[in-house]
Image (spheres, rainbow, N blue to C red):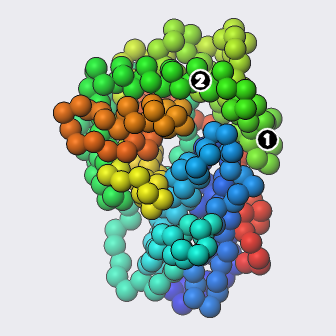
Amino acid sequence: MSSSTLGAPALERLVAAAVAAPSLHNTQPWRFRFDAGTRTVRIHAAADRALRHTDPVGRAVHLSVGCAVLNLRIAAAHFGWEPVTRLLPCPDRPALLATVRLAESVRGGPSTGLYEAVWRRHSSRFPFSGRPLPSDVLAELTEAAHLEGAVLRFPGYDDTDRVLRATWEAEWRNRADSDRAAESRRLVRAPHCRSLGLASAALGPQDTLDRMPMRDFGAHRHSEVLPARAFETHPTLALLSTAHDRRTDWLRAGQALERVLLLATRRGVRASLLHQTMEWPDLRRVLGGLPAHGPRGHAQMVIRLGYGPEGLASPRRSVEEAMEGEM
C-alpha cells in the first residue's frame, strides 16, 4: 500500500478488516464512508441493524462499532498509515460514531501480530479444557485493555460464581421475554447465509450440567432440543469495565474488547462473550461492583477465556454491502 495514495483494493482490505469485528448477535451495525480528499473513513451506526428490544439504548451498537474501529486502526498501521481516530466527532450527527483519518506514517515499528489475528479471531462457544491461563498471559490481556482506556479484571472464585449466577438470571429473563426471544430467533440463519444473522453451526452446544450459561439464541424452553456437552468446572472469566458510562466510554470499551480478543487469539487462547447481564441494567450494576473491595466501575462485557476448540466463523456482509458510496 502506498503511503501517499489509497486505491480501491487497499480501502477494501481496510474495511474488510473492520467488518471482521465481533458484534452482538452478529448484527454488524455499522456503515462506512470514505472521504478521498481527507483520506478519512467515517463509521456510522446502522439504525436498521440495531436490536430494539435487546439493546434499547444502543450501548452494544457502540461496543460493536468500537471493535470495528480497532480492527481498522490495526489494519491501517499494518499497511503503513498512522490512524488518527476521533470518537463522536460531530455532536449534531449522533449516528457518526467515529472517524479514522489515514495520515502518512513517519516512523516504523515492529509488527504486533494483531493484524494476522484479525482474520483468525472467532468466538468459540465450545467447552474449554479448564487449563488455567499463565500469569504472563493474564498480565498481557490486562495491559491490552488498559491501552484503550478500560479495565480488565479476573474475578476470584466467589466473584466468578456471582458473575455466573447473574448471567444465568439474565439468560432466564431473555428466554422469558417474548420480544427479546423473537428478536433473537430471527437472527439464527443457515450456515452459509450472507445476510444478517448467525450461522447455526457457529452457535455451539449448551452445557449439559448447567455450569456455563451459554446463550440460547433460539430461545428454546426445553434443553433437550439443543446439543449439549459438559463445560469446564472452573471457568476463567474476565470482566471488562470503564470508569464512566458515556457513549465515548462504550466506544473505548469496544476497542479495548477487540484488542483483548486479538491478543488472546495471537496467544492461542479461545474466547467467547457472555453479554446477557449487560442487557439488564440491575444485573449490570451488580457486576460493576465486583470485586466488592475494589473501585466501582461500569461493566461493559464478560469474557470467557480458555484453551479448547477453535470457534467457527459467523457470516459477514461484503465490503460493498457495508460501504456507503463508491470506493
- The part of the image, by quadrant, that contains residue 26 is top right
In x, y percent, where is residue 52?
69, 45
User: Which one is nearer the viewer's eye here, 272 or 291?
Assistant: 291
Assign a secondary structure to mark 2.
helix
Q: Position of residue 18 (x, y in %)?
A: 59, 61
Three-letter residue code for mark 1: His
For the residues marked 2 and 1, what is the alpha-carbon distance in whole angstroms? 30 Å
Look at mark 1 in the image and give the residue it sits on. 192
18 up-or-down from 300: above or below: below
- How many marks on residues? 2
**Pointer 2 or 1: first along the chain:** 2
Query: Which amino acid lies under the numbered mark 2 shown in the image of this protein?
Result: Arg
Location of residue 174 in the rendering, given as x and y in whole percent from the top left corner: 62, 27
Q: Is residue 106 above or below residue 29?
A: below
Between residue 264 and residue 275, name the one nearer to us: 275
User: Crowding at label 1, few (<14), some or many (≥20) Cα neighbours within 10 Å?
Assistant: few
Relative image position of residue 44 (x, y in whole percent) = 63, 66
Q: Which element carries disc 1, helix, strand or loop?
A: loop
Quarter of the figure that contains the C terminus: bottom right
Which residue is found at the position 33% from the left and 58% from the top? 149
Instruction: State whether residue 151 appears in this view.
Output: yes
Q: Nearer the viewer, residue 307 or 39?
A: 39
| Marks 2,1: beta carbons within 8 A | no
Residue drawn at point x = 73 percent, y = 32 percent: 179
Front of the two marks 2 and 1: 2
Q: Answer yes or no: is residue 145 visible.
A: no
Is 170 on the left or on the right of 320, as rendered? left
What's the mark number on residue 184?
none
Q: Which residue is mark 2?
A: 173
Figure check: 261 above or below 278: below
Q: Residue at x 44, y 49 (%)?
A: 257
